[in-house]
Image (cartoon, helix red, strand yellow):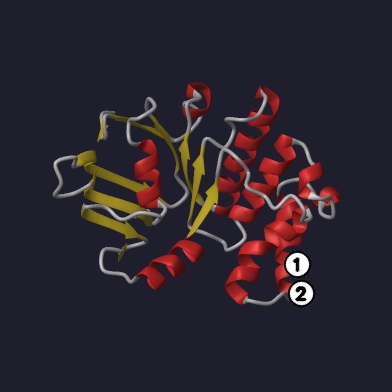
Amino acid sequence: MAEEILRLENVCKAYNVGQTSETEVLHDINLHLEKGEFLALIGPSGSGKSTLLNIVGLLDRPTSGKLFIKDQDTAHLTDAAITSLRGHRIGFVFQYHHLITAFTALENVMMPMLVDRGFPSDEIKARATMLMEQVGLEKYSNNLAGNMSGGQQQRVAVARALAMSPSLVLADEPTGNLDTKSADGVFELMRKVNSDSATSFLLVTHNLDLAQRCDRIIEVVDGRITA
């Protein structure tokens, strides 16, 4: 039996609960993701994709329903426990790379580990160096992030997302700001990481060509999974 990485059971999300302006954004979302799966999440703007991604990424909590990360029910975890779980189990790649442009590429990749450990070490540097090699940028390790191309910066962002060896990587329109060639390169890189390490990916994209190259496609419309 495949190992389950993520499960949502009847997840709903509403804002301004109890007020006249109460708005329900997500309705009874049921979703699962197994180890090594590469899942695309599509839907029009305003469909609830970002809200769903925030809940999966433990950046927001559902109004009702349950969210499990590797069989751990997150419903009653403290904020500190949620932060720890997010830091160790989930990696993030955003549309905007959010690198610290005054730091080198290698230093950016080291950052999640430094935040977790509180101090630098040879082990942290060695892992960051290995990840730079994995994304094909070992020659650029000492380049300032701000001096790299958009495609290179996004590759560094992928390496940074893998720093803590997460079970799940959430990629929110990671190719949205790239030209076609660079976008294809970043997508293929994520696919290679997925294949080599069995890291699960949840990719939010408007690019149907990329979505069709994923293992499964989940479509969200008006806060509901429709296909």
Q: Is residue 91 left or right of residue 145?
A: left
Up-down: is 224 above or below 98? above
Quadrant where the C terminus sits is: top left
**Pointer 1: what residue?**
126
What kind of residue is marked 1? Ala
The x, y position of residue 62, in whole percent, is 26, 52
Q: Quadrant of residue 31?
A: top left
Q: Is 25 situated left or right of 205 in this image?
A: left
User: Circle 2: is it few (<14), some (14-19), or many (20+) Cα within 10 Å?
Assistant: few
Percent from the top left, x then y, of residue 9? 22, 50
Badge 1: few (under 14), some or many (20 or more) residues near its Cα, within 10 Å?
few
Q: Which mark is residue 122?
A: 2
Horizontal arrangement in the rendering, residue 22 relative to residue 196 (left or right): left
**Which residue occupies 70% across, 70% down?**
124
Image-quadrant location for residue 109:
bottom right
Give residue 107's position: percent from left, percent from top. Answer: 74, 60
Q: Relative to 148, is 111 above or below?
A: below
